[in-house]
Amino acid sequence: MNRRIIILGAGITGLSVAYKLAEKGKKVVVLEREPCIGGLAGHIERNGCFIDYGPHTFFLDEEMQEEFYRIIDRKEVNTFKANALIKYDDQYYSYPLDAIDILIKSSPFVLFKFLLDYILAKAKMITKRPIDDSAESWIINRFGKALYKMYFEKYTEKVWGLHPKYIAASFVEEGIPLLNLRKTFKTSIVEATKRLLKKEDTTKFPYIFLGHYPKKGPMAYFNKLANEIHSKNGLIYLSSQVRSIHIDGHKVVKISFEKDADIKTVESDFVVSTIPINDLVKLIIPRVDSKILNASNSLKFRAVIFVDLIVKKQDVLEARMIYVRNKTFNRITEMNKFSKDLFPEGLTGLCTEIACDKDQEIWNADEKELCNRVIKELEEEGIITKDDVVDAFVTRKENGYPVADLHYERNRKLLYDYIGSIENLFITGRQGLFRYLHMDQCMKMGMKVAKDIITNI
Ligand SMILES: Cc1cc2nc3c(=O)[nH]c(=O)nc-3n(C[C@H](O)[C@H](O)[C@H](O)COP(=O)(O)OP(=O)(O)OC[C@H]3O[C@@H](n4cnc5c(N)ncnc54)[C@H](O)[C@@H]3O)c2cc1C
């Protein structure tokens, strides 16, 4: 008997699971709340322009490249090295941080302070083994206070909405972006030496720095995945919001979802959830107990507002993207630098990201007011003038970043253990696992879940 596998969510994780299962002849049904696939990595299409929800580049190791290029032709994809800057006190630095860049651009006084603090931190590490009880202490213990203050403290607070002393140390180790410092210090010196000695060979560039970007945006890849799923008789229901997950004993037996104002029910043999873990447990019937409910309410996501501008100018930024601390937005990207095929001739798209909480006033701010505010800030920076702007609009995503406060691991584990007791329910992906994951990791995890199900059937 071919058993039915229901996949909740059609972001990259849900699509990767569905594709792998459908490829093996399994019966899959994907339920997606939105009217389109792609989730957080999707895009907005407007008057012939395509803008991502924040730029989405694929960083693929060899195994994932093989998977990726089975679906999409290499000719349809641009590849490039990371090209981002971060602005500190009127000075642009490479991002992720580059030791050589810091050496060249910092004043001798600042460099001396970095070095002194760094040596002191290292000495303390050897003699006292200080405790890492937060992201702040983890970084200061390894890199010293001066580097922490300059590069980490303010930007982190802006993006995550929490001071680093309230962010878990484990989260930093799991891959908070600025924290490539240790790796960066090692690799940047090695890379810089290589660059000096010989012509750079980008095929050997560490995969985390080599981006793959479909010329028509990541949606081009997702559309191909969806076509593959359909061609293997898989079903993808859009505008279908999961409303309840019915458990009998230790198994999910059926899922109810809302489509076209109608509640429909589908029976399930296996369920793979990629929707936010805290939403998932609240959909379960019979209802979860108060301990699980409290844990799920304690796990918070940071939301992101995208203020996008289409401008009649090109090459307006010095890099593909710039991280900033002193503006309403925390990052700005020029989409044309990812692919010329995203915009008609003579235009480019600027995507600015504002990380915020849903209870902050800015989350509900008026579209026009947000656009005007961003345009004004870009004018002040000399990047564009308001006459350059031909279109401006706002989109919002509630589940941008999982917030790793000091208790998130305990709360997450409670949910993992509870979900683990339901035999045929699997969770995966960035929202499903409440982990700060990139697309390649989501693809890998999705494929692993599909494999586990195939061996269990
Ligand atoms: C600003 C930004 C930039 C990023 N840039 C990069 C990058 O350059 N490279 C990279 O590798 N990664 C990047 N990422 C990370 C990347 O977006 C994620 O790793 C990836 O999109 C997560 O995919 P997912 O399928 O796990 O989750 P999602 O894409 O969030 O998919 C979950 C899906 O579930 C659906 N859903 C939710 N609730 C329900 C419900 N009740 N019923 C039905 N459906 C539901 C949602 O609509 C959504 O489509 C970035 C993230 C952000 C926020």
Image (cartoon, rainbow, N blue to C red):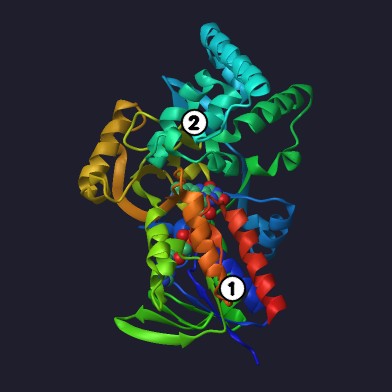
Q: Quadrant of the C terminus?
A: bottom right
Q: Position of residue 33 (x, y in %)?
A: 39, 70
In the rendered image, which residue does mark 2 sit on? 136
Based on the displayed image, in which of its 4 quarters is residue 50 positioned?
bottom left
* Disc 2 CB within 8 Å of nearest ligand 1 atom: no
Q: Residue at x 63, y 78 (%)?
A: 22
Q: Residue at x 41, y 86 (%)?
A: 265
Query: Three-letter amino acid code at disc 1?
Result: Ala
Q: Position of residue 51 (x, y in %)?
A: 42, 52
- Residue 42 badge: none
In the rendered image, which residue does mark 1 sit on? 18
Q: Are marks 2 and 1 in contact (CB under 8 Å)?
A: no
Query: Three-letter amino acid code at disc 2?
Result: Glu
Observer able to see residue 314: yes
Q: Position of residue 300 (x, y in %)?
A: 39, 52
What's the CA distance linking mark 2 and mark 1? Answer: 40 Å
Observer able to see residue 223: no
Which one is earlier in the sequence, the residue at label 2 or at label 1? 1
Query: Relative to the observer, which residue lies in front, 207 or 280?
Result: 280
Q: How many marks?
A: 2
Based on the displayed image, in which of its 4 quarters is residue 258 positioned?
bottom left
Based on the displayed image, in which of its 4 quarters is residue 257 positioned?
bottom left
Q: Is residue 383 left or right of residue 427?
A: left
Q: Is residue 129 left or right of residue 257?
A: right
* Disc 1 CB within 8 Å of nearest ligand 1 atom: no
Query: Relative to the observer, which residue lies in front, 364 or 349?
Result: 364
Q: Is residue 31 left or right of residue 228?
A: left
Query: Relative to the observer, which residue lies in front, 413 or 220?
Result: 413
Q: Position of residue 425 (x, y in %)?
A: 55, 74
Asked if 273 appears above or below 355 in the picture, the reply is below
